[in-house]
Image: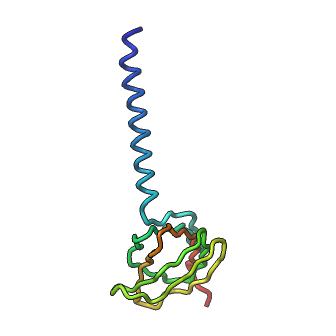
């Protein structure tokens, strides 16, 4: 029986190490600005954006209109590649907003200058109405 104890101890230590590592990875993911895909089909794409304080989303653009549902209150600055604020949004938790397609050739970054994470669900059309 004593021969099984070292194997069992190694197995338990391995499982605990894996769980600890997974916990650290999850904690790191929870502190990073990110987009989490939710759903996609031929008509639309849905994701959750989490914008942490002082961690802007990278420069990007939206070729199509989109609805946004604020999961938290927050103020978000939209900045151009030169860092100039071109728009500021004041999101209210539980409210929905419409944002049109970005002008052709323009990109922006979303910046959270507050002390709390901002979370939104974005539903972007793949084909705008003609």
4 versus 26 height, above or below? above
Farthest residue toward the top? Answer: 1
The answer to whether residue 100 is left or right of residue 9 is right
Q: Toward which corner of the image does residue 69 lie, by quadrant?
A: bottom right
Question: Which quadrant of the figure contains the N terminus?
Answer: top left
Question: Which quadrant of the figure contains the C terminus?
Answer: bottom right
Farthest residue toward the left? Answer: 82
117 versus 2 height, above or below? below
Q: Could you tell me residue 49's position as x and y percent?
A: 51, 68
Q: Could you tell me residue 13's position as x and y percent?
A: 38, 29
Along the line of sight, the residue nearer the viewer: 11 or 112: 112
Tell me how the rendering is colored.
rainbow
Residue occupying image coordinates x 58% and y 77%: 91
Residue occupying image coordinates x 52% and y 86%: 101
Q: Could you tell me residue 116's position as x and y percent?
A: 50, 67
Count of numbered circles in the view: 0
Along the line of sight, the residue nearer the viewer: 76 or 45: 76
The answer to whether residue 97 is left or right of residue 30 is right
Residue occupying image coordinates x 42% and y 27%: 12
Farthest residue toward the front? Answer: 115
59 versus 51 height, above or below? below
Along the line of sight, the residue nearer the viewer: 15 or 75: 75
């Amino acid at each position: 029986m004593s021969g099984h104890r070292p194997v069992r101890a190694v197995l338990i230590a391995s499982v605990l190490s894996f769980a600890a590592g997974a916990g650290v990875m999850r904690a790191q993911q929870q502190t990073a600005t990110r987009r989490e895909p939710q759903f996609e089909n031929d008509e639309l794409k849905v994701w959750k954006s989490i914008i942490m304080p002082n961690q802007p989303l990278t420069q990007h653009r939206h070729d199509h209109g989109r609805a946004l549902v604020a999961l938290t209150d927050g103020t978000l600055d939209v900045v151009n590649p030169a860092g100039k604020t071109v728009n500021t949004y004041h999101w209210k938790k539980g409210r929905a907003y419409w944002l049109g397609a970005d002008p052709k050739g323009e990109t922006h970054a979303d910046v959270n200058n507050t002390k709390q994470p901002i979370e939104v669900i974005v539903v972007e059309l793949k084909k705008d109405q003609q």
